[in-house]
Image (cartoon, rainbow, N blue to C red):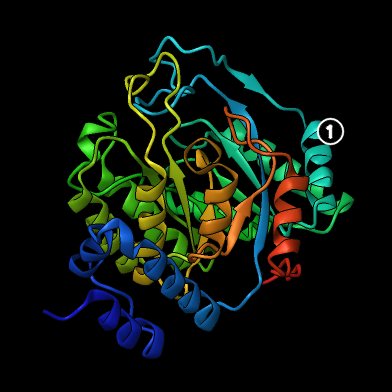
Amino acid sequence: MTDILEVARRQVLEEGKGLTAEQAYECLTLPDERLEDLLALAHEVRMRWCGPEVEVEGIVSLKTGGCPEDCHFCSQSGRFESPVRSVWLNIPELVEAAKETAKTGATEFCIVAAVRGPDRRLMDQVREGIKAINEAVEINIACSLGMLTREQVDELVAMGVHRYNHNLETARSHFPNVVTTHTWEERWETCLMVKEAGMELCCGGIIGMGETVEQRAEFAGQLAELEPDEVPLNFLAPRPGTPFEHYGLVEGGEALKTIGAFRLALPRTILRYAGGRELTLGDLGTRSGMLGGINAIIVGNYLTTLGRPAEQDLQLLSELRMPIKALSKTL
């Protein structure tokens, strides 16, 4: 029987062709004693096809809570009895958050809103916010505003939005167990429109929401088919009041196998550490992931959970001699 890592070395490292879902499953089910081999190969792939630079990003919520959707992992849903309440951020606060993000060396600042999709009020506030940020600081601006119409996609392009985040969240076969108020296909359609309009697409999901290992592999294959510019990997941090509040954390070795497998399925993609890594991986696991295929991080806090101080992540990058990606305006 041919060893999957030998296959991956030829197919991914040498030829730049990502693993299929079936091959990703083989990586996800490798025995624990092969984990270091998987991460070492994933790191080689990252260095060959992406280079040593690490993209640093900060995020801020323009509208927090009160979302009408029922994403079972999310404490911002207005359908659950969670401690998160609906709040809007004003423009000066948005600009200040962008300035603080830029001070860390970050090149991306993402404006996020807890909505099904943006209404006129939100689009107007985003436009005003982007204008104010651009006047105050030099940083690429990304947005995550839910599902879009084609007109809204074009409007965001005209505002100068550099990248749009819209996660598929999980494999298509598992999605109905996670969300019931909209479909996986609706999310997919927004992603396609973003790509067609010329914005960079950021699209990932959350590991540990009750999916099988087969479904994790399926998810990796579906992301590879979509070909996003960036894939944020979150690990479920169960939130009080949500349907998933009693789910356990993803085990560290399992999380690292996921990182390695996703890098081999997506050799040229920005693979970003996102929410849940602090609980799932801790300091040593975070370091292992950076040496196992990760080439981007979110610094500071997330939308409803606390992250590590930005200084810790920047110190880690310095120790690993991984340069922070320089700012470049691509739109």
**Which residue, as the protein is rendered here, is positioned at the far front?**
33
Does residue 9 appear to the left or right of 152 in the view shown?
A: left
Vertical position of residue 42 compared to residue 309: above or below: below
User: At x 66% / y 36%, what residue is drawn?
Assistant: 301
Taking depth in this image into account, of 287 and 161 the one nearest to the observer is 287
Q: Do we see residue 14 in this rendering?
A: yes
Vertical position of residue 64 compared to residue 268: above or below: above
Name the image quarter holding residue 56: bottom right
Q: Quadrant of the C terminus?
A: bottom right
Taking depth in this image into account, of 317 and 65 the one nearest to the observer is 317
For disc 1, the marked residue is 92
**Which residue, as the protein is rendered here, is positioned at the far top?**
81
User: At x 45% / y 31%, what residue is drawn?
Assistant: 237
Residue 225 appears at what percent x and percent y? Answer: 30, 68
Vertical position of residue 293 compared to residue 189: above or below: below
Does residue 2 appear to the left or right of 130 in the view shown?
A: left
Q: Indicate the amino acid at tag 1.
A: Pro
User: At x 56% / y 39%, what residue is drawn?
Assistant: 278
Residue 161 appears at what percent x and percent y? Answer: 64, 57
Taking depth in this image into account, of 252 and 111 the one nearest to the observer is 252
Vertical position of residue 210 compared to residue 102: above or below: above
Does residue 172 appear to the left or right of 161 in the view shown?
A: left
Q: Quadrant of the N terminus?
A: bottom left
